[in-house]
Amino acid sequence: MKRSRVPFFTTITVLVFFYLPLIVLSINSFNDSRYGGPWKGFTFRWYVRLFHDPQIWHALKNTLLIAVSATLVSMMIGTLAAFALHRYRSRLQMVHYGMIYSPLIVPDILMGMSLLLFFVALKVKLGLFTIFIAHVTFCLSYVTMVVLSRLQDFDFSLIEAAQDLGANGWTAFRRILLPLIMPGIAAGGLLAFTLSLDDFVITFFVSGPGSTTLPIHIYSMMKHGAPAVINALSVILLLITFVLVSASRTMREKTE
Amino acid sequence: MSDFLVFEGVSKRYGETQAVDSVTFSINRGEIFSLLGPSGCGKTTLLRCCAGFEDPDSGRIILDGKDITGLPPHRRKVNTVFQNYALFPHLSIRENIAFGPRTAGWTRGETDKEVSRMLELIQMEEYADRKVTEISGGQKQRIAIARALINRPQVLLLDEPLAALDLKLRQRMLVELDSIHDEVGITFVYVTHDQGEAMGISDRIAAMNLGHIEQIGTPAEIYEAPRSSFVAAFIGDTNFFDGTVTEVMDGSYCRLRIDGFPDVLAWNDKGLQVNNAVHLSLRPEKFNISREQPDALPNRNVVQGTVEDIIYLGSHTKYWVRVEDYRLGIHHQHSRYLLDTRPITWNEKVWISWFADDSYMMERYKPEDENLLVLPDMEVEEEVLPV
């Protein structure tokens, strides 16, 4: 029987659909033409200009500052939340679970709006701090979900075994539970980091003067017409994201 | 020394279920003591109370003269071998065994020396630096034992330690456990639902059911002289008879009338009188089954029946023989080469005989324990069902 060609063409079509824009973008970032379009020769000009733009560096600094701090804080709170959700039995647990889960399903634009209204009502000055709070709010949910699934697979007789062998509660936590769920916490952290890095909608609502992050800066560059530099920036971001995501995947696979 | 580990009126309730109901018994220093019973009988709860994972609702547990009730697990000189081994997957075999000593703050030199000694005891020196995920079930079992023993506990608790292994390995590990016990000489408390394991390894067995201890004794006592119908039916297989004493004879025998069965002679060690009710247990291997009528002897019971079911098991055959209203389960050992003879077959008329001394009068009888028998009489079952 002749093998059908349909699967092959479907695959090609899907791959083209997914990756052609990215390829065009990457090629264009080396195109010596200000507004893209026809090929005018190979250049590193946009990359050079990118690295000499102080505003981009400032935005990048803000973005990393927020991503790192929001990740660390949400890793801590998220892990504790996962423990609380896993360990305690209470009629309110479903409510707690819903509260943690809802930022995952609530549309970003609603999250951004409500956070903005909240900050305005409390008269909190919009800036890096409000962005940080907003990012912790949604990163927290991702970390909690990843750690919680890890805890649900955890064999708690290991804790009993540790106690049986002379470990008190803290030692059992530090030497058994923590090392064994660490991959879950780290995977949650990586996920949080990438989400914080490229968040636009929520950040847009709660940022203030001087607290521009990279995605927001890119948006304003778009409006002021500098697509070539943005192409270069996008390629770099693409590479960073790719590295982070594959690191997170390897970490999760290694522990399964 | 007796009374090394004492359970005094220990009770534990989970919600509606009384898992352990005021249990009192004591374990001698250095013995292998088994808690044997079906799942839910309370044996694991007792073990967990002893390890400190559960606190009894009432009662005390005394180890070597000290009340250990309420002490947290890490403060008891008791270690556990868990059913699923509970080895730490992120640590090597050596690190697993060294966990206790490290926590207790032994010096590095002493820890290394003891770990090596333990690896030697369980014959796994060459595996020391492997990961826990790279070894077989039997090896994991040995690591779990070494990890517990290195702490020099006063009592080693074993919670169904062989349940996850296949049959041959289980039998081999049982012998190995026994030799490890001979070597270290500490007290083992062994929880199992497998009567074969318990009989094979224990000095004494406590047969448990529904949160109570039904009987404590050596394996032979438990098997040969079961005090209750539960013990008789759960440990090994047996035949039950309900009868009434019609005649007390010299030499401590008595004659029993049994509804739906010929009269039988029984050893009257309970000193029963005429008209007393009796519940007899008669083990399947005590019967002799033959085509020829056996010689009549003063203390021998002889009845005739028809073979209904046969299960050939190599070393022996199980027969179910109909005698009036009863269906007798009989084990016949093949001590001679079977194919040289013409084996007894279905629907054959056979002679069944046994000695009056070989049945045992139980003190307690519950009809539902008949459900524990290997092949209960289905016709009796049907009569019980509401129509």
Image (cartoon, coloured by chain):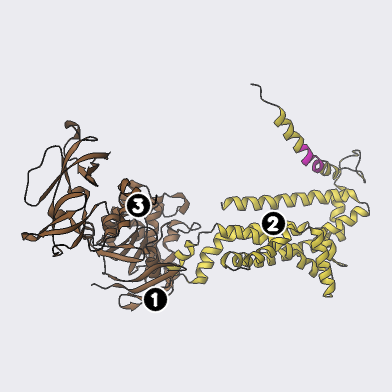
Q: Quadrant of the N terminus of chain B?
A: bottom left
Is A105 on the left-hand or right-hand side of B259?
A: right
Of tags 2 and 3, the one toward the viewer is: 3
Q: Which residues are magenta?
A: A15-23
Chain that is brown in the image = B
Q: Where B303 falls versus B32 (above or below)?
A: above
The amino acid pointed to by label 3 is Val
Query: Of A33 and B28, which appears nearest the observer?
Result: B28
Q: Is A239 on the left-hand or right-hand side of B287?
A: right
Label at residue B58 = 1
Residue A15 in view: yes
Q: Residue at x 50, y 62 (%)?
A: A156
Image location of residue B191, percent across then percent down? 35, 61
Is the residue marked by circle 2 packed among few (<14), some (14-19), or many (20+) residues within 10 Å? many
Q: Relative to the observer, which residue lies in front, A127 or B250?
A: B250
The Cα–Cα distance between marks 1 and 2, rounded to whole angstroms, is: 50 Å
Q: Are marks 1 and 2 on the same chain?
A: no
Name the chain under label 2: A
Answer yes or no: are tags 3 and 1 on the same subunit. yes
Q: Which residue is mark 3?
A: B384
Amino acid at circle 1: Ser
The residue mark sitting in front, 1 or 2, is 1
Q: Is residue A239 magenta?
A: no
Residue A77 place in picture, x, y as percent: 66, 67
Helix or strand or loop: what does disc 1 sit on? strand
Residue where numbered disc 2 is placed: A191
